[in-house]
Amino acid sequence: MESASLLGFVDGQSGDPIVTGNSMDAVADRDCFLEFCFACATLGAHLSRVCEDVVIWNTSEFAFIWLPDTFTTGSSLMPQKKNPDAFELMRGKSARLIGNLSTLFTLVKGLPMTYNRDLQEDKPPVFDSFKQASICLDVFTACLAGMKFRAEKCAEAVSDPMLLATDLADYFVMRGVPFRKAHHMVGELVALSEKTGTPINELSDSDVFAVCDKADSSWRDVFNLSRAFEMREKIGMPGRRQIEAQISAWRELLGDSKKPRKGKKK
């Protein structure tokens, strides 16, 4: 009875065994296996996408992060290169997890609604999905703990004024310009910036006023990155307070009481 209770086959309140009301369902149903493998495949897909981001961020072209030697290997040709093997392997594991789910669906799709010997093949995909998902979670957790961000590279990447072109359109809207027209105006300024090789935030006032007569000299304030983040403090936005609130909420949900580290404001 203890084993049955641990497996969920006993009513938690009455203590009576839980009996299925459909014998065909009892022997033929494999929904629990399918759902478990689906959860593992979904987890694998999410981890794979994060791993892809990390692989890109680790390239010399981005260089947003530093990875510890524990989870990287040297190139067989280029001595200066560190390959993010752990993340590449986890990205590959997602294919295996998705494959296990596909195997189960293919296994049960043509069976009659009773037990068949084919179902002896339902255990390996489940056990393998559990093993591979567990490995991925353990390695992923350790990798994230050792990964460090290169703040100066990240700051350099977000310093491109073109990233705030939409903010300029919003600025025009706040001065009574319909967004459709404001969008077109900013498009003209972007084209002028590219044609002259002048960063959009360094265009002359006369250039901007020629496109939007409702603008004034405060239009340049739009390209202040700190201001841009301060303007994004609603739910789901990337403002500092919103991000810290998200980190705190997830730490609490995941049972981690550590408070988020607060870096120096820039």
Image: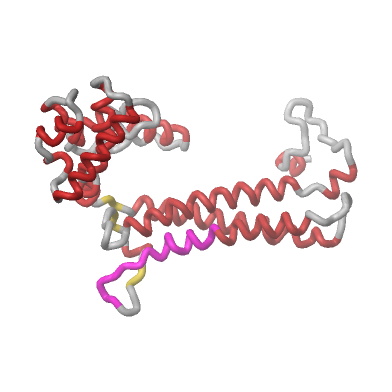
**Front one among 261 and 41:** 41
Q: Residue at x 47, y 64 (%)?
A: 89
Q: Residue at x 77, y 49 (%)?
A: 30
Position of residue 216 measured from the top left corner of the image (x, y, whole percent):
13, 25
- Percent position (x, y) of residue 96? 59, 61
- The quadrant of the rendering that contains the C terminus is top left
Residue 90: in magenta span: yes
Q: Choose top left, top right, bottom left or bottom right for residue 265.
A: top left
Above or below 52: residue 246: above
Please give left or right for residue 138 compared with residue 101 in the image: left
On the image, which quarter does residue 257 sit in? top left
Q: Which residues are magenta?
A: 78-94
Say left or right for 193 vs 48.
Answer: left
Q: Is residue 43 left or right of residue 73?
A: right
Q: Position of residue 148 (x, y in %)?
A: 29, 52
Asked if residue 14 is positioned above or below residue 117 in the image, the reply reads above
Q: Determine which quarter of the picture holds residue 220.
A: top left
In the image, farthest residue toward the bottom: 77
Residue 251 rendering spot, x and y as whole percentages: 41, 36
Q: How is the image coloured?
A: secondary structure
Judged from this view, the residue extending furthest toward the top is 176
Q: Relative to the observer, which residue lies in front, 125 or 202?
A: 202
Q: Residue at x 15, y 39 (%)?
A: 201
Q: Residue at x 26, y 22 (%)?
A: 174
**Would residue 87 be counted in the magenta stretch?**
yes
